[in-house]
Image (spheres, helix red, strand yellow):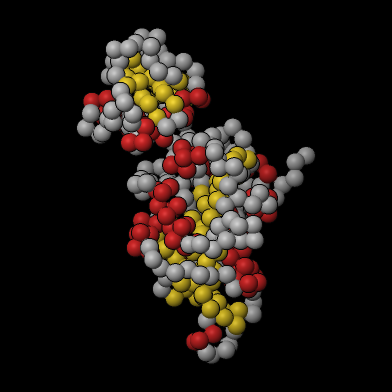
């Protein structure tokens, strides 16, 4: 019988020594609680701070309220408070305001560009909580690059004993769709519990938590029938909402080619079935009369012009993508996703 755990244990993912660690799993297994607890532990050990971020200020405001409520009981000899954009700690009953020490700094990723030039000499960790947009919510434009730039701002030239960036990044969330910026950036999928980001040499690691190894803390036993099937399936390990046939084994034989898409990761055929569907296949379209285009500026080369958002080919691909009618033929075509979502 497989061992069952009560709370998420960060030791396994931290043992991989990645610069960026992504933990994705069902709610109520202690991902956020554990990250807060470890932030306080690090501060009490060596005085290091954690930058805690959410996507927008709208998300950050309620997240700051009562931030330490769940972990304060672990340190009965200390007081905790949130003061503006910092979370602080001090020994109880000192009566001196100067005794408050900063453990957490809060920020919204949406306005992180304003932090450029700011010094963060004590911040050794960045935690991006709820990094996966909920169904119906929008990711930020260039969200991955925003977090990269913030990481560079915070770390600057600091290095650890091995000469790598000293600041580590931890992303937490509940992924329900393969179609998100983090999975697209590093070619993650639903195939394995542990994955390394493509072309990262293990510097980016994903743990797709096996919910079966954890006690069900969100389920019918607590919430009855009011919970809904999505959360129940997710809590049972059924992570991903249907992508409407996002990856299919073959294209419709009645579909016709309308472009070859040249990307930084290869060439792909775009096939149209009337105005109903678009299929993406691996490899260039054989028909030489079909235009070759690039949706990424860096993929442009002689004979391959850049198709901006006003061109017919890109508008058609984007329209079908937004409508959920763009299908990738075999998992190999998933390599085109990064260009298609631009």
Q: Residue at x 68, y 52 (%)?
A: 15
x%, y% of residue 18? 60, 50
Report which quarter residue 106 is drawn in. bottom left
| Residue 164: % across, % down | 58, 56
- The N terminus - image quarter: top right
Indicate left or right for 80 with 301 as reference: right
Q: Please say if 46 is above or below 8.
A: below
Q: Nearer the viewer, residue 43 or 241?
A: 43
Asked whether residue 268 is in view, the answer is yes
Q: Position of residue 194 (x, y in %)?
A: 63, 40
Residue 33 shows in this picture: no
Label count reads: 0
At a point 59% along the width and 32% down the height, the residue shown is: 191
> Residue 86's x, y, as percent?
46, 72
Q: Residue furthest right?
A: 1
Check the image and name the residue furthest to the front.
Answer: 302
- Which quadrant is home to the C terminus? top left
Q: Quadrant of residue 212?
A: top right
Q: Residue at x 36, y 24 (%)?
A: 261
| In the image, residue 284 above or below residue 99 | above
Q: Residue at x 62, y 35 (%)?
A: 192
């Amino acid at each position: 019988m497989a061992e069952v755990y009560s709370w998420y244990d960060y030791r396994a993912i931290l043992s991989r020594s990645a610069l960026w660690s992504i933990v994705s799993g069902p709610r109520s297994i202690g991902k956020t609680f554990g990250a807060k607890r470890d932030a306080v532990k690090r501060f009490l050990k060596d005085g290091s701070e954690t930058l805690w971020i959410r996507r927008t200020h709208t998300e950050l405001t309620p997240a700051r309220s009562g931030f330490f409520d769940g972990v304060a009981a672990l340190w009965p000899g200390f007081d905790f408070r949130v003061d503006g954009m910092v979370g602080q700690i001090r020994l109880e009953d000192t009566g001196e305001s100067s005794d408050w020490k900063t453990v957490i700094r809060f920020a919204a990723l949406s306005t992180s560009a304003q932090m450029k030039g700011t010094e963060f000499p004590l911040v050794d960790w960045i935690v991006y909580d709820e990094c996966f947009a909920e169904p119906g919510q929008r990711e930020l434009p260039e969200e991955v690059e925003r977090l990269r730039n913030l990481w560079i701002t915070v770390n600057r030239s600091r290095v650890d004993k091995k000469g790598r960036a000293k600041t580590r990044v931890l992303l937490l969330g509940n992924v329900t769709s393969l179609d998100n910026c983090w999975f697209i950036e590093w070619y993650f999928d639903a195939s394995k519990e542990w994955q390394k980001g493509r072309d990262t040499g293990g510097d980016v690691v994903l743990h797709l938590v096996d919910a079966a190894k954890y006690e069900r803390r969100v389920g019918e036993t607590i919430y009855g029938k009011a919970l809904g099937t999505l959360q129940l399936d997710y809590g049972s390990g059924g992570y991903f909402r249907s992508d409407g046939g996002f990856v299919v084994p073959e294209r419709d034989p009645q579909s016709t080619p309308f472009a070859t898409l040249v990307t930084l990761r290869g060439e792909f055929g775009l096939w149209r079935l009337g105005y109903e569907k678009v299929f993406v296949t691996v490899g260039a379209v054989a028909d030489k009369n079909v235009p070759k285009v690039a949706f990424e500026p860096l993929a442009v080369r002689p004979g391959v012009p850049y198709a901006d958002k006003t061109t017919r080919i890109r508008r058609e691909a984007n329209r079908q993508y937004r409508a959920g009618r763009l299908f990738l033929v075999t998992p190999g075509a998933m390599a085109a996703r990064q260009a298609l979502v631009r």
